Amino acid sequence: MHSKLQPKYRRILTITAVTITAFLMWNSMARKPSNLSTTSKYTSAKQKAVQRCFYGIDASPCIFDYEWDERRVKGQSPLLLPRLRDPFNGWNVLNEDEESLQENHNSDRKIAILYFNERKEYLEKMDRYYYDEVKAASSHPNLLVRMWGPGWPKYNAKLTAQQNIAQAFPNLPFDIIYTKTWHHNVTSDTAVVIHGTGDCHKLKCIHEKYYPTHADAITFRYAGEILEFGRPEQWKLREQRRVSKVFPELNETHQRSMEQPMPFFFHSPDCADEALMHPIRSSSRTRWWRSERWEDSRPTQIQLLGYTDSSWYPLRAKILHGIEKGFIQNAKVYEHVGYVLQPEKGKAKKISSLELGVFDPQDPAVEHHRKNQQSWAKTLATTQICVFDSSILRKAIRKYQESFMSGCVVAADIPLEMESVFKGVVIPLRADMEVEEINDVLQRYLKDKERLARMAMEAFRRARSLWTCRNKVDRLLEAAEMVVSGERGYWFPFEFRGTCRLFEEGGGAGGKHMTEWCRKREV
């Protein structure tokens, strides 16, 4: 065909073809940052794996995702061996050797866990961290998981928690009972009882009527609070007061014999569900030849997240003021939905048709929570910079985990725990910064999309390696194994600082108190 064209037309076609080719090559180098991301520097095999997972190119899990501990998957756990409880000296595992573990590996027995909690909280609690953990545990190949407690079918308020559990599950001897309710002091002759908690509002966790006296272990979501509220002298004092009230007729020697030993304390930070919290791809491309860029799916540039009460969150309150007065640009405020969400009318009474205690991820009674979680996940996945703070306690709240997994770059202060995980991937802010300085920092980072993309993807990798709910379930199992093997004291899987911090005591700014070892001496 070309041979039939006149020479001048052939020259025009050739020039046009060369021009188009050159333009595409220039655009590829100048505008297309790399095969998958904003930055051409993200080129190592490890980084490319992060990119492919970050942008959802691979349908399979990320190669750096946390995987279940292989030993427990194979059924080789001390929790599966026969054991005896000594009321005052802990547990004794019988025949904890390789041969016994191998024998159990050849059996069909699974580790049985009861997540014991109140149905009212299940229906109303906005923060679903406990239930995301139950969901993850239910996916473990060698766990048998049940979730049940006060308010659920067959629970009798006239019986003790232990009697209720035995009556509801007569043929299911649990290995672990994991509870987060303060209102029911769970005991068990056969299961390792672990109580989980987060905050200690108004110091209730050190009041004897709330404290889980008979727990084998107590886990805090924030490491520093263990030193603040879980010291041996505190436990001993609480037990002395409790026993003297319960058994006033006993002499001092007998009362001491009734005191419970201090449980095993361990730190287990929050987790996030990567099936829900993850980056999303943009629905449209402005140019057909350009690959996905980090900012393409994130139309919101800066967003302030969370409750903004100044007595608890001074940095958030300052940023809110800056946004409202126009001192902080390119920013908006996410409307906090509240900590309690009531179920939709008529749905609270709906009970899952599954077997008693089996977790139902599609339970219609909590559809309102699923909708809220999906809305929250979309907010994080469509925002470039997520702004909040760690509260006056300087704790690693769940917004860090969720933002990291969603690919939103966090701008906040650095918590006093797991600092190495936050290093280099968080835009550092401080409560003592002026509003103008905060705005300068945010705008400087906002202009550098390549830097933000690198930070987002590295934070994403760290979160998927350390903060999935599989991590948290395995940590629970490991702690229980340590307990039945005779461990006492404390377990801190991550680094933290036991330095000065404020706590809210009586409510409001006037009720704060300082960490005990940081208080000024009164003369």
Image (cartoon, rainbow, N blue to C red):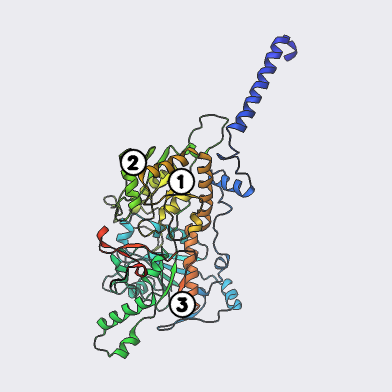
Mark 3 highlights which residue?
Answer: 488
Mark 1 highlights which residue?
Answer: 408
Mark 2 highlights which residue?
Answer: 323
Which residue is at the front of the view, 166 or 258? 258
Q: If you read the primary sequence from the N terminus, does the residue marked by circle 1 or circle 3 appear first?
A: 1
Q: Is residue 493 visible?
A: yes
Quarter of the image for residue 359 reads: bottom left
Residue 115: numbered disc: none
Amino acid of disc 1 = Cys
Q: What is the secondary structure assignment of the residue under circle 2?
A: helix
CB under 8 Å between callouts 3 and 2? no
Residue 286 image position (x, y, % from top left): 51, 30
Q: If you read the primary sequence from the N terminus, does the residue marked by circle 3 or circle 2 appear first?
A: 2
- Please identify the quadrant where the N terminus is shown: top right
Amino acid of disc 3 = Arg
Q: CA distance from mark 3 to mark 2?
A: 49 Å
